[in-house]
Image (cartoon, helix red, strand yellow):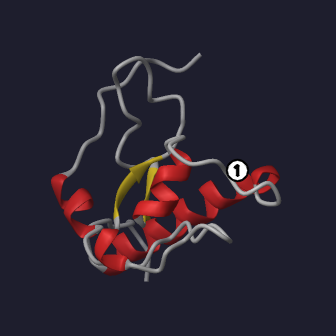
Amino acid sequence: MLQKTTPIHSKKIRDAARNQPCTLQIVGVCNGDWSTTVLAHLPDESHGIARKSDDLSACFACDSCHSVIDGRMKWPPMELEHKDWYFRRAQIRTWRVLFELAIFSIKGAA
């Protein structure tokens, strides 16, 4: 069992989402309007009652994709079975952008 950790929140990460391309890009949902992009939190073990996931467990999402992951809109039937793949892909895409913006750093990375 993992220890309970202090939440990881970063204004720089949240601010970096502004006007970025949506990294979720759910087929049949994504609106392509990057002016609506925000940092959207993905489900993981760091979230709970009245607590969002850490900012590390998040992605850049347009308003439409964000509505789907937050349950305000339904997943397209053909994409629901790929939900976990979308989450992982979006999280890695987001981490890459944050690395390129020097918000994330990785020791030893070129």
Q: Nearer the viewer, residue 19 or 85?
A: 19
Where's residue 49, x and y in %? 41, 17
Where's residue 108, x and y in %?
42, 72
Q: Where is residue 62? Give x, y as percent.
A: 42, 67
- The residue indicated by pointer 1 is 84
User: In the rendered view, would you say 48 is above or below 58?
Assistant: above
Q: Is residue 21 above or below residue 48?
A: below
Q: Quadrant of the N terminus?
A: top right
Going 52% across and 71% down the picture, which residue do you hit?
Answer: 93
Q: Quadrant of residue 19 in the image?
A: bottom left
The residue located at (21%, 50%) in the rendering is 10
Query: Dividing the image into 4 quarters, which one contains the C terminus?
Result: bottom left
In the drawing, does residue 19 fall left or right of residue 91?
left
Number of labels in the image equals: 1
Pick the residue in front: 56 or 43. Answer: 43
Up the image or down, 26 lies above or below 32; here it is above
Question: Is 107 situated left or right of 76 in this image?
Answer: left
Q: Amino acid at mark 1?
A: Asp
Residue 91 in view in this figure: yes
Res 14 → quadrant:
bottom left
| Residue depicted at 34% across the width and 68% down the height | 37
**Residue 26 vs residue 86, the one in the foreground:** 26
Q: Residue at x 29, y 76 (%)?
A: 35
- On the question of residue 20 being in view, the answer is no
Q: Residue furthest front?
A: 73
Crowding around mark 1 (Cα neighbors within 10 Å: few <14, some 14 to 19, many 20+) is: few
Rendering coords of residue 73 (x, y %): 56, 48
Relative to 26, is 77 on the left or the right? Answer: right
Give SS at disc 1. Answer: helix
Q: Classify 97 as above or below 46.
A: below
